[in-house]
Image (cartoon, grey):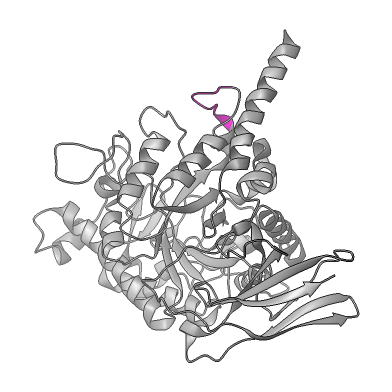
């Protein structure tokens, strides 16, 4: 009996992976992963220990085809980087305000490491949270200690009061400081806007509403407007400082439950962005205030109050021509069985839905450590099936539709450690047509040279050279190199025949 059941399970798994093997691989797709600090995974580590930990995570994620890292650098009005404004984070050193010793800058180091692997680095900040429940002591330079009148306390948290205009300016100052001093590819904010509600505990913003909410008949509308103003101002700040830096948000997974109102809603029955967190995400997307949207759809297919499949389709229907990236819970995905095939987990069904739903531009994995430890075989399956080819970032023509000129002077040269393909960048005028990376494609002799074929993409490099593999003798390939600008708009290809 046990042998027969085991055989059946293997057959079910094989059928699921066979479907994955035939699934077309997209040329462009955001494949993200969150690396969080708020769980304390780095707290008290030495520089060498933390760098080794992050190196291992990045290596595994790169092998799994992940191309975007959301790295948490501001947890509670603090910094996992050399901030000129806020104190060092206790989630780094164990004590808020205490600098790491030996001194180093995790954000600068992560930018370099991600770019070396062809990944984007998006600096992830929590805009409003100023103290988590577990923090018992704030540094004297913490913003709460300097201006306590700008905050309120809620269920053990300190929150930057969203209704105070000075707080919007302050948060945008933090964002501008990060973006101006670090070569980040994006700024990312999470789902913490007004605090998650606690039964029987009202938000203590009576004074702020009395002072600033006069033109609003509804306090709910006033609160939503406060968050709207921050999102709009953040977008404008980033465009002014570095127009190529992408601004993304990962809201809670339900915008609004369908009801008799004229507010768009999904067939769900859970907590709502619009009503409880005062986050009007659809307005931000519609108005172009965010560049990509990563709703946290952490539930399973078949969840009774928040069905994953229902929510994927709902968000896709409201994407408003901004890349929609699905926030995936790795542990829950491998924990729950496929609703139609109980012998396998939900990974095949979720990826099938992601890849076949118009408007979906990728996924982001919660969380990196679950991938790295290969929870339920998730990393292995990514590498072998769902991310078996590389992918460029989703197109964002609303930032710019310009692209670099094609590369020139391609040549093959033997070096002490092997053969290399070299090229030179074309002329450029500004950031929109300046190459910051290159895509390298390879095609066998006689094969169609289709740059939309992701299986031909060999790698993405920030250097104008590529080490050629040792293919033996008598083999011929055509290599095509394209130039990529900061948002990975792609030039025409330049071709070189290479004989081995």
**Residue depicted at 46% across the width and 82% down the height:** 432
In this view, the residue in front, 454 or 355, is 454
In the rendered image, residue 320, in percent from the top left (x then y), is placed at 30, 58
Q: Is residue 327 left or right of residue 468?
A: left
In the rendered image, residue 132, in percent from the top left (x then y), is placed at 47, 54
**Residue depicted at 39% across the width and 71% down the height:** 397
In this view, the residue in front, 129 or 342, is 342
Q: Is residue 237 left or right of residue 54?
A: left
Quarter of image, res 301: top left
In the picture, the quarter occupied by the C terminus is: bottom right
**Is residue 450 at all visible to an observer of this figure?**
yes
In this view, the residue in front, 214 or 310, is 310
Instruction: Please tell me whether the stretch drawn in magenta is mainly helix, strand or loop.
Output: loop
Q: For the view shown, which residue lies furthest in the front direction?
A: 446
In the picture, the quarter occupied by the N terminus is: top right
Q: Tally the marks.
A: 0
In the rendered image, residue 180, in percent from the top left (x then y), is placed at 49, 82
Tell me if residue 341 is in the magenta stretch.
yes
Q: In this view, does 317 lie to the left or right of 387?
A: left
**Residue depicted at 56% across the width and 48% down the height:** 24
Q: What stretch is highlighted in magenta?
A: 335-342
Q: For the view shown, which residue lies furthest in the top direction?
A: 1
Q: Is residue 378 above or below residue 57?
A: above
**Residue depicted at 33% across the width and 41% down the height:** 198
Q: Is residue 298 above or below residue 248?
A: above
**Is residue 467 at all visible to an observer of this figure?**
no
Tell me if residue 271 is in the magenta stretch.
no
In the rendered image, residue 238, in percent from the top left (x then y), is placed at 40, 76
In this view, the residue in front, 35 or 138, is 35
Q: In this view, does 147 lie above or below 345?
A: below
């Amino acid at each position: 009996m046990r042998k027969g059941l085991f055989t059946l399970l293997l057959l079910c798994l094989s059928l699921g992976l066979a479907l994955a093997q035939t699934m077309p691989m997209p040329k462009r797709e955001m494949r993200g992963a969150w690396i969080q600090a708020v769980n304390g995974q780095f707290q008290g580590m030495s520089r060498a220990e933390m760098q080794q930990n992050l190196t291992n995570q990045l290596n595994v994620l790169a092998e799994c085809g992940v191309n975007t890292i959301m790295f948490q650098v501001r947890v509670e009005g603090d910094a996992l980087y050399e901030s000129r404004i806020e104190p060092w984070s206790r989630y780094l050193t164990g004590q808020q305000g205490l600098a790491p010793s030996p001194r180093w800058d995790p954000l600068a180091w992560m930018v370099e490491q991600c770019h070396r692997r062809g990944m984007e680095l998006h600096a992830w900040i929590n805009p409003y949270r100023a103290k988590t429940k577990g923090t018992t002591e704030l540094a004297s330079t913490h913003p709460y200690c300097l201006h306590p009148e700008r905050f309120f306390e809620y269920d053990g948290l300190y929150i930057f009061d969203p209704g105070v205009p000075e707080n919007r300016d302050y948060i945008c100052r933090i964002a501008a400081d990060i973006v101006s001093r670090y070569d980040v590819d994006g700024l990312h904010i999470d789902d913490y806007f007004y605090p998650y509600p606690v039964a029987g505990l009202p938000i203590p913003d009576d004074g702020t509403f009395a002072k600033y909410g006069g033109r609003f008949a509804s306090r709910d509308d006033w609160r939503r407007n406060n968050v709207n103003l921050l999102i709009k101002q953040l977008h404008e700040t980033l465009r002014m400082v570095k127009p190529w830096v992408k601004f993304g948000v990962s809201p809670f997974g339900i915008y609004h439950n369908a009801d008799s109102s004229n507010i768009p809603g999904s067939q769900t029955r859970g907590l709502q962005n619009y009503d409880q967190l005062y986050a009007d995400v659809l307005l931000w997307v519609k108005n172009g205030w965010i560049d990509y949207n990563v709703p946290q759809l952490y539930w399973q297919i078949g969840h009774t109050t928040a069905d994953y499949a229902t929510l994927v389709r709902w968000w896709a229907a409201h994407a408003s021509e901004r890349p929609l990236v699905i926030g995936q819970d790795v542990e829950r995905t491998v924990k729950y069985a496929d609703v139609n095939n109980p012998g396998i987990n939900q990974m095949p069904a979720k990826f099938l839905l992601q890849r076949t739903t118009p408007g979906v531009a990728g996924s982001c994995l919660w969380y990196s450590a679950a991938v790295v430890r290969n929870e339920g075989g998730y990393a292995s399956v990514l590498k072998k099936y769902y991310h078996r080819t590389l992918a460029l970032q989703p197109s964002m023509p609303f930032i710019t539709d310009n692209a670099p000129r094609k590369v020139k002077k391609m040549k093959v040269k033997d070096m002490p450690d092997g053969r290399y393909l070299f090229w030179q960048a074309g002329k450029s005028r500004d950031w929109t047509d300046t190459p910051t990376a290159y895509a390298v494609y390879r095609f066998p002799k006689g094969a169609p040279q289709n740059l939309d074929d992701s299986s031909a993409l060999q790698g993405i490099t920030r250097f104008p050279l590529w080490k050629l593999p040792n293919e033996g003798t008598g083999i011929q390939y055509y290599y095509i190199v394209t130039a990529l600008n900061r948002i990975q708009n792609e030039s025409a290809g330049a071709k070189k025949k290479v004989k081995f």
